[in-house]
Amino acid sequence: DNCSVASVSNNAPAIFPIGTTIVTWTVTDASGNMATCDQTVVVSDVELPTIVCPAPVAVNTDAGECSASGVDLGTPTVDDNCSVASVSNNAPAIFPIGTTIVTWTVTDASGNMATCDQTVVVSDVELPTIVCPAPVAVNTDAGECSASGVDLGTPTVDDNCSVASVSNNAPA
């Protein structure tokens, strides 16, 4: 001021919320003349939310299937300095046999994200089935006290996943 400044004040809050706040500054001189200006204050949330995944999950295949459905993954523990907007995961509706990594994602209201990984193990504990071929009756080989080249037939086998091998203990 050309004479003297009597006061300088503003209307700033004690705590600024996320987003844009306009602060108006006012200067008053000794003669009571006033002037104002506006200052923009932008508060951004850049702090990542936190997430702790549920414990690993181990399940068996569904009966008659080589996969598991309806797997209960549990719920992650999430937190944020402001607010959590969403929690999601990339889990399939049906888990294949073996190990699947499920990635959980938490997003806060400002778009900050954090992730964690949960392990889901699907095991096949269903026994395969086998139906033996019909009984075989054969005669001894000529001049021998044994029979060779006996056609045993083939058993009927099945499994919810796949049959790895079929064997027997017949003499060679």
Image (cartoon, rainbow, N blue to C red):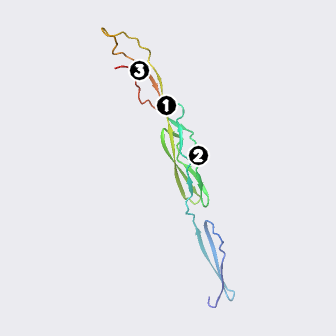
* Tag 1 residue: 160
Q: Position of residue 4 (x, y in %)?
A: 64, 89
Residue 145, quarter of the rendered image: top left
Q: CA distance from mark 1 to mark 2?
A: 27 Å
Compared with 14, 128 (above or below) is above
Residue 109 is situated, as x and y percent measured from the top left of the image, at 59, 58
Q: Secondary structure at mark 2?
A: loop
Q: Residue furthest top?
A: 143
Q: Secondary structure at mark 3?
A: loop
Residue drawn at (63%, 66%) of the image: 17
Q: How many marks?
A: 3
Real-space Cα separation, disc 1 to disc 3, in angstroms: 20 Å
Amino acid at circle 2: Gly
Residues at badges 2 and 3 in contact (C-beta under 8 Å)? no
Between discs 1 and 3, the one toward the N terminus: 3
Residue at image coords 59%, 71%: 41
Q: Secondary structure at mark 1?
A: loop
Amino acid under disc 1? Asn
Q: Which mark is residue 103?
A: none
Of pointers 1 and 2, the one earlier in the residue sequence: 2
Work out whether 73 lies above or below 21: above
Q: Determine whether 129 is above or below 50 in the image.
A: above
25 vs 77, nearest the viewer: 77
What residue is shown with label 3? 154
Using a 10 Å C-alpha cutoff, classify the residue at mark 3 as few (fewer than 14 neighbours), some (14 to 19) or many (20 or more). Answer: few
Q: Quadrant of the N terminus?
A: bottom right
- The residue that disc 2 covers is 74
